[in-house]
Amino acid sequence: MGLGDKIKNKAEEMAGKAKEVVGEATGNQELQTEGQVDQAKAHVKQAGQGVRDTVKGIRNSLDK
C-alpha cells in the first residue's frame, strides 16, 4: 500500500471519528452513525490494502 493511500485512509478514519464525536455531543444520531460508517469504510480499505501488500510480498519472495 502506498503512503498516499495510508494517509488518505487515516484521514477518512479521523474525519469519521470527528463526525461521530460531534454527533454524540449534539445528540445527532444520524451524524454519529455516519461517522461510524465512515470509520468502518476506512478500516475495510486498510484491511484490503494490507491483504494486497501481503500477497505482493509473498509473490516477490517466490520470485527470488
Image: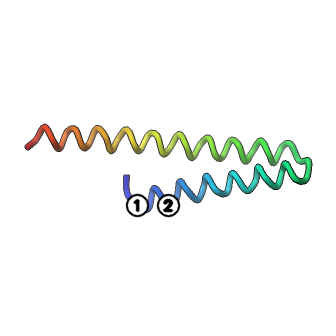
Amino acid type for the residue under numbered disc 1: Leu
* Residue at x-position 89% and y-position 47%: 28
Q: In the picture provided, is 33 more to the left or to the right than 9?
A: right
* Residue at x-position 72% and y-position 48%: 35
Label 2 sits on residue: 7
Q: Secondary structure at mark 1?
A: helix
Estimate the x, y position of residue 3 in percent, counting from the top left. 40, 61
Name the image colouring. Answer: rainbow
Q: In the picture provided, is 18 more to the left or to the right than 10?
A: right
Amino acid type for the residue under numbered disc 2: Ile
Q: In the picture provided, is 21 more to the left or to the right than 39?
A: right
Estimate the x, y position of residue 7 in percent, counting from the top left. 49, 60
Estimate the x, y position of residue 29 in percent, counting from the top left. 86, 42
Spot the residue most to the left. Answer: 64
Q: Are marks 2 and 1 in contact (CB under 8 Å)?
A: yes
* Residue at x-position 44% and y-position 39%: 48
Crowding at label 1, few (<14), some or many (≥20) Cα neighbours within 10 Å? few
Label 1 sits on residue: 3
Crowding at label 2, few (<14), some or many (≥20) Cα neighbours within 10 Å? few
